[in-house]
Image (cartoon, rainbow, N blue to C red):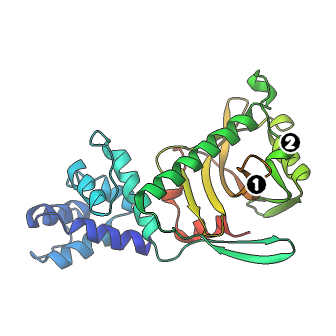
Amino acid sequence: MSDSEKKGCIDLLEVLSDCDLYSLADTVTNKKIPVGGNRREALKTIVTFSTSAQELLSRQKINKDVLFKYLVKYNVTPSVNTKKPELIDEVLLLWMKQSQKRPTINFTINNQYNTVNVNPVAGGASHEQDLHKLGLTFIKWFYDSLNSHNPSRGVTPKDFGPQHFYGDAKLMVLLPGPPETRENCTGQQAVSEKFLHFVSRENLLFNPNCDHGGVMVKDDPHGLVVVMVCGTIHKDNQCLGVFDQMFGLIKDPQFHNNYKIKISKMKLTATAVSNLPRLTDKSQAEISDLAAV
């Protein structure tokens, strides 16, 4: 668990009764670590012996009511019909947002080096919801349009090209090793052609996780919107691995004030996949690494 997850778990567990808390400690440790009726010791033991925050929140003692009330406490208001797995995702996302360390994005605009702190701005839950909706809309458009250029889809290719990128757009493609390889593209034409190469030449299809912790969106007071997403990569009905991607978006007043892509980083990893990847399962260090260019 990350430090923010440990802190969040202890905060959430505080609402449990003594009976439920001690029972949970026995379950987590298989009754091998006595807590002696000490709440503080029970909290520490539960967090220490839980393999992950996801696993702990899935325990029977932490029911939907506990998760729902905890979210409401922090001004997150899910639907009363929300299922437990989705409530767990909301809690994990909340803890990620509460983390003291935030990713930064380093990039160059007009030959000037910039470091943008990806921190939430004022506006509360409504602003966060609007941002997340913006991110989801962008992600669905981007990959749907890009995938349409894969000949195996048998569909009419949708509008996707250099017009959706700034003239000095940058893309970094990272292939973990050994050996690790990095490829950098600069310019709207080169960047758009690289994306299209993946689907039209290599016949790849990208399946973004638009639910359950797969998308993270933040903005900056200067107008930069950072969208992060993860998902699976497919070819010829086979899943080849996973991808993680970051986009830096800025509104273009000459493009009907719509967002254009200023910078992107894509990490492609060949691996066996048993579950849809989630950003909420990643450590803060991994999120920061994805954001750094």
User: What residue does disc 2 label?
Assistant: 197
Is residue 31 found left or right of 111 in the rendered image?
left
State which quadrant residue 114 falls in: bottom right
State which quadrant residue 62 falls in: bottom left
The image position of residue 220, as x and y in percent, is 61, 68
Is residue 141 found left or right of 111 in the rendered image?
left
- Disc 2 versus disc 1: distance between alpha carbons? 26 Å
Which badge, 2 or 1, is on the more N-terminal residue?
2
Residue furthest to the top: 154
Badge 2 crowding class, 10 Å Cα cut-off, few under 14, some 14 to 19, many 20 or more, is: some
Confirm whether residue 198 shows in the render: yes
The image position of residue 187, as x and y in percent, is 89, 57
In this rendered view, identify the residue nearer to me: 280 or 104.
Answer: 104
Is residue 256 found left or right of 57 in the rendered image?
right
Q: For the residue marked with disc 1, what is the amino acid?
A: Asp
**Residue drawn at (20%, 66%), measured in percent from left and top?**
25
* SS at circle 1: strand
User: What residue does disc 1 label?
Assistant: 252
**Residue drawn at (63%, 60%), measured in percent from left and top?**
226
**Residue drawn at (66%, 63%), measured in percent from left and top?**
224
Q: For the residue marked with disc 2, what is the amino acid?
A: His
* Image quarter of the N terminus: bottom left
